[in-house]
Image (cartoon, grey):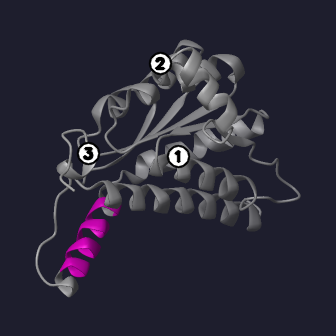
Amino acid sequence: MSQTPQDPRSKNEVFQGALSSVVDQYAARYTQGLKAVSTENLQKAIELILACTSRRGMIWVVGNGGSSAIADHLCCDWTKGTHHAQHPTIRSASLSSNVALLTALANDFSFREAYATQVKFYAQTGDLLIAISSSGNSDNIIAAVTEARSRGVPVIGLSGFSGGRLREMADVSLHVPVNNYGLVEDVHQSLMHIIAQSIARQRDQGS
């Protein structure tokens, strides 16, 4: 089957050669992408998450496709994976996990507004939005970011490729400068785990 112009595969850097060479190239580019992420911004993201949690705010997460799966996984690991009896629970929810609501909003308004409308419904002062978009230009993700910012809700953006609009709009940008959707998603998943394990370590060590 040929690719359509909209197929994101057409934007991917393609690794050539024997399978062993492809594995080596993929691993090298993954390492390059992960190490290119600003550790200063990563620390700022952790601080925003902990500040939101300390004031009992809610962390809302948005993403499409593979990024939606990362959003669900993020909520599991940030909430359950950091739980500590002497610290407040990180309260988080993925705005793609309620399929009935998401499809109703997409049908009655538009897919572009499906996340932004939920931000309008739910987000309050003291909350935090995590926006995940490999291209950084997904219209419904940008609409959610715009709505969050209009309400004074800070945004952590996870992007790839050139970073797109999300990189520019986010209060804290975790940008992965590689041109392959699978690699960007792999690094985003790793960043999610790094954040969860860093917070858990701080809590377990009593800091």
Q: Quadrant of residue 118?
A: top right
Write down the residue under mark 3: 7
Secondary structure category for the residue under label 3: loop
Q: Amino acid at mark 3?
A: Asp
Magenta segment range? 22-34
Residue 1 visible, this angle: yes
- What secondary structure is the magenta-colored segment mainly? helix
Q: Which mark is residue 133?
A: none
Choose between 201 and 92: the one closer to the eye: 92
Write down the residue under mark 2: 146
Q: Amino acid at mark 1?
A: Ser
How many labels sit on residues?
A: 3
The answer to whether 187 is drawn above or below residue 176 in the figure is below
Measure the C-alpha gap from mark 3 to mark 1.
18 Å
Which callout, 2 or 3, points at the residue further toward the start of the chain?
3
45 on left or right of 186 = right
Secondary structure category for the residue under label 2: helix
Give the residue displayed 65% in from the left and 38% down from the top: 99
Q: Nearer the viewer, mark 2 or mark 1?
A: 1
Q: Amino acid at mark 2?
A: Thr
Write down the residue under mark 1: 68
